[in-house]
Amino acid sequence: MDIAIIGSGYVGLVTGACFADVGHNVICVDNDEEKIKTLQAGRLPIYEPGLEEIVHRNVSAHRLHFSSSIREGVDKSHIIFIAVPTPPQPNGDVDLSFIEKVSREIADVLTDYRVIVDKSTVPVKTGERVAETIKRYNRHGAKFDVVSNPEFLREGCAIHDLMHPDRVVIGAQSQHAVDLMKKVYEPFMAPVLVTGINSAELIKHAANSFLALKISYINAISAICDASGADVDKVADGIGMDRRIGRQFLNAGIGYGGSCFPKDVAAFIHIGEQLGVPFTLLKEVQRINAGQKERFLKLIRDTLWVLREKKIAVWGLTFKPDTDDVRSSVAIELVDTMLREGAHVTVYDPKGMEKARELKAIADAKFAASALEAVDGAEALVIATEWNEFANVDLTALKRRMTTPIVFDGRNLLNPDTMGELGFHYHSIGRASIIPR
Ligand code: NAD
């Protein structure tokens, strides 16, 4: 099928590349001309494992094209996916101006029937607004259908998630649009759930908020473990072995970040308030998440006493491993706070350095070329993102290169027994601290 994707970021580019890989003809459109030039030159503006190979393969096969013209995308495609940002506003409401602008731009150049599919995460009832807007600006009176098709991919394993989705949600009013959408997804052989547009939109916020809630649940338990001497990893194993609960998303840590969970939880709270049904449970999720970072900072302050002039290394800047995405990363917030308190912070991340260097909040940090270089002479190491590279580090070299071998493991990445045997002073989340005698 001929498909256009408007917005070629983490979601749009990966979706476009995977659609092309299963045989569709795809045009990825973006209004960031630099991004389009980069893509046309055969380079990728983001890091996602496996993406480069798929993009190159499909560009060579002439199934994947890049353009900065929405008109070209709309003219050449039957189905137009929208994958533009839906960032949060300070009050938690979603900024839908990107969606509105793209809807107007599509309407302006619409001459024949098209299916316009919203893939961005949007508040329930946005589809109605998109349809109204397209109708209003539809100069040629062309027919169209609006569909909601929320995206559930996880950065870091986005290709796998796109190619093998747990489910494809299609929210539509017209059977014709449903049939076309089923054709798009046919090669993926995934379970398809057809719903109304409002339900499809709601599914995305409900799913992400539930995952954030699950993380916050184990984080709240980690505080009880810290206070009682129980081990949160064992507790998570014990409850996760119950198939009704499951072990995924039960890893205690310094809280969730990234461009989705914080904004989607805030948006869902706001949606509830606007609809007159306050979702106070999610306010508690937000409180627990913020508290987890504060508890970790308190642990660091209680141990090091004064942060001013302390040399602290931070491993991990991205909001999760296997991505270069540093948007709303808890790691960045930690570095920012420690810098403000006068610490000398040296950071290292396997893929996030380039994007992190652009952030004003951590401009005073030093950027090291490797994990071990970051800890040279450090009085403490903070692990903020659970990259495999950090789990496999040479711990003897780590200890040798630090001035005082104190480790704060915000992701429970390392083994406390091993750290104890090697003589580290080791703190993690919801597990007993190891303090050498
Ligand atoms: P992103 O910022 O990486 O990409 C969005 C792209 O849209 C950018 O390249 C931007 O230049 C482009 N854009 C903005 N306005 C445009 C316009 N008028 N015309 C053409 N292009 C335009 O964002 P993302 O992470 O891909 O997220 C997109 C949406 O998908 C959001 O609603 C997000 O919540 C949702 N989502 C994201 C993820 C994720 O893991 N990143 C997962 C599921 C859903």
Image: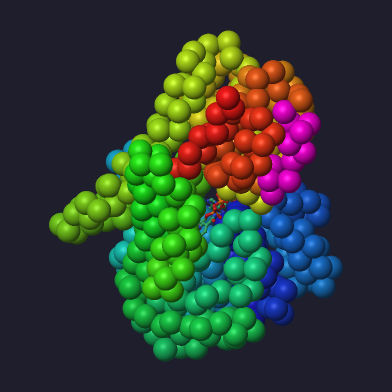
Point out the residue furthest to the right here. Answer: 60
Tell me if I can see residue 425 in this picture.
Answer: yes
Rendered-image quarter of ligand 1: bottom right
**Whole-percent x, y for residue 296 in the image:** 45, 33
Of 391 and 118, the residue lying toward us: 391
Q: Give the x, y percent position of residue 381.
A: 62, 28
Q: Is residue 134 visible?
A: no
- Left or right of residue 175: residue 21: right
| 221 relative to 331, above or below | below
Which segment did they paint magenta?
A: 388-399
Residue at the image position 46 percent from the left and 21 percent from the top: 301
Q: Residue 146 falls in which quadrant of the image?
A: bottom left
Q: Is 264 located above or below residue 393 in the figure? A: below
- Colouring: rainbow
At 74% from the left and 61% from the top, the residue drawn is 50
* Residue that lies at the very extreme toward the front in this rendered image: 437
Q: Is residue 85 left or right of residue 313?
A: left
Q: Is residue 396 magenta?
A: yes
Quarter where residue 373 is shown? top right
Q: In the orientation shown, which residue stands out farthest toward the left?
A: 276
Residue at left offset 61%, top offset 70%: 162
